[in-house]
Image: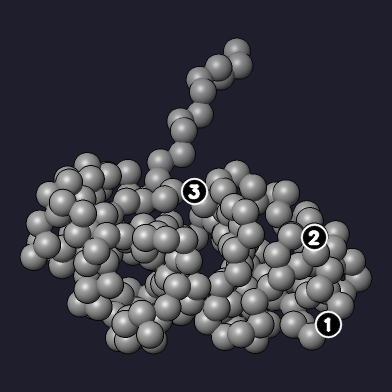
Amino acid sequence: MADTALAAPPRSPLAHAADRLAAATRASRGAIRLAELPFLTQVNVRLDAKGAAADAVGLALGLQLPLEPDTVVRAGESTALWLGPDEWLLVGPPGNERGLESRIREAAGDEPVSVTDVSAQRTTLLVTGSRARDLLAHGCPLDLHPRAFEAGRCAQTTLGRTQVVLVSRDEPRAGFWVLVRSSFAGYLADWLLDAATEYV
């Protein structure tokens, strides 16, 4: 007899913390907003930035891969983060992994390219509000002043002793994305909630 039980829907790494993140957001009255953005598509791309594949991939995606260190390029719902001279992280809406991978491989043709779906490796925390920079500064070694880490910048760094990719979003009042490995997400959420107590 066939097993007709439906598979359980995927559970995000911070599903257990959603109520506490929402409560801290409400209590801060606009100073801090904390939320998980689960299941975002995340595809790591490595190729020669000066080769033909870089331009072809940029055209196929509708956004050019950023060439300036620690910068972000956004077009529509897709965002490209510079991680190194030949490495980028493409972030998009949930469920777009296979389509994104296929477009990149097809665009690159015979040029050497590495395309890896890392969507399940990390989750994303959204940190916004009037005190978002202050909150992150409690545990991040970077200078987060807007002159030093302006909108449209990203960095691989640490936050509360956890390795993260920190993105200063370029939309008005969009705050920050904190991309953290799923296995450390619970710890980082607890750290953020503890650090946010002075704002609630």
Q: Are marks 3 and 1 in contact (CB under 8 Å)?
A: no
Q: Residue at x 65, y 51 (%)?
A: 97
Residue 60's tag is 2
> Which residue, given by chain and number where applicable, does mark 1 sit on?
51
Q: Nearer the viewer, mark 2 or mark 1?
A: 2
Mark 1 Cα within 10 Å, few/some/many (few <14, many 20+)?
few
Q: Is residue 50 left or right of residue 23?
A: right
Mark 2 Cα within 10 Å, few/some/many (few <14, many 20+)?
some
**Residue 24 shows in this picture:** no
Q: Residue at x 60, y 63 (%)?
A: 74
Q: Amino acid at mark 2?
A: Ala
| Mark closest to the chain's N terminus, 3 or 1 | 3
Q: Amino acid at mark 3?
A: Phe
Q: Residue at x 71, y 70 (%)?
A: 64
* Mark 2, secondary structure of its residue: helix
Q: Are marks 2 and 3 in contact (CB under 8 Å)?
A: no
Residue 118's tag is none
* Mark 3, secondary structure of its residue: loop
Q: Residue furthest front?
A: 172
> Which residue, given by chain and number where applicable, does mark 3 sit on?
39
